[in-house]
Image (tube, rainbow, N blue to C red):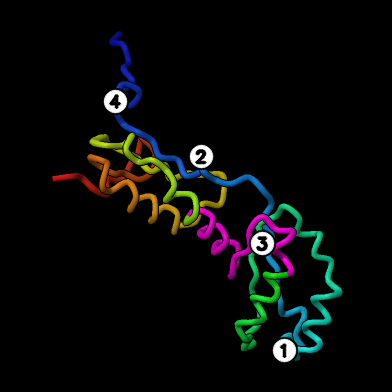
Amino acid sequence: MEEIINKVANSTLEVFDLEDYYPKGERVELDISQWLLEGFLLREKDFREHLKQHDWSQYADKYVAVFCSTDAIIPGWAFILVTIYLTPFAKKVANGRLEDLENSLYEEILPTLDYTQYEGKPVIIKGCSRKPVPTGAYLLAAQKLHPFARSIMYGEACSAVPLYKKK
């Protein structure tokens, strides 16, 4: 019987796993429609009073996505005011839903990495994840790897989809 050789283990293939850069911490969404009259009308005096009465400490050390679930027209200052209340407690505040928050986190982290270790190497951007890695993070990773990698693939080593190869 012939010996089975693991070609992947013996290759120069580098795996770029976005989960390795996933920041630890709880993520929550904060829907400001709860502070609008019937969920649609922002009355400044009432809105400010709701914010003053709200328990902001519940967001301590959390990543917070601030959004409005209704089709209300919200002035820009309202989101800014909510952010000001959150800032002493939250690790980070982002506008939008959880995916927007995740994108925002990766937009901070990925530009700070050193990609020179991938110079001239085939790279696979790991596709399967147990954490909610947003599509935007994969796009940004590909942009950052592109100048360095000899080739870029997506997925797993056993079933990678080729995306790019230097000429």
Please give left or right for residue 163 compared with residue 134 in the image: left
Q: Residue 17 got which mark?
A: none
Q: Earlier in the sequence, mark 1 or mark 4?
A: 4
Q: Label 3, label 1: how many angstroms apart (C-alpha)? A: 21 Å
102 over 72 or under it: above or below: above
Q: Is residue 101 magenta?
A: yes
Q: Label 4, label 3: how many angstroms apart (C-alpha)? A: 41 Å
Q: Earlier in the sequence, mark 3 or mark 1?
A: 1
Q: Amino acid at mark 3?
A: Val
Query: Label 1: which residue?
Result: 42
| Frontmost residue, 44 versus 158 | 44
Q: Residue 20 got which mark?
A: 2
Q: Label 1, label 2: how many angstroms apart (C-alpha)? A: 41 Å
166 over 104 or under it: above or below: above
Image coordinates of residue 100 in percent, x first then y, are 54, 64
Packing grade of label 1 (10 A; few <14, some 14-19, many >=20) is many
Query: Label 3: which residue?
Result: 64
Q: Earlier in the sequence, mark 1 or mark 2?
A: 2
Q: Which element type, helix, strand or loop, lies under badge 2?
A: helix
Q: Residue at horizontal 42%, vertical 51%? A: 111
Please give left or right for residue 118 compared with residue 94 in the image: left
Q: Label 2, label 3: how many angstroms apart (C-alpha)? A: 21 Å
Q: Residue 11 got which mark?
A: 4
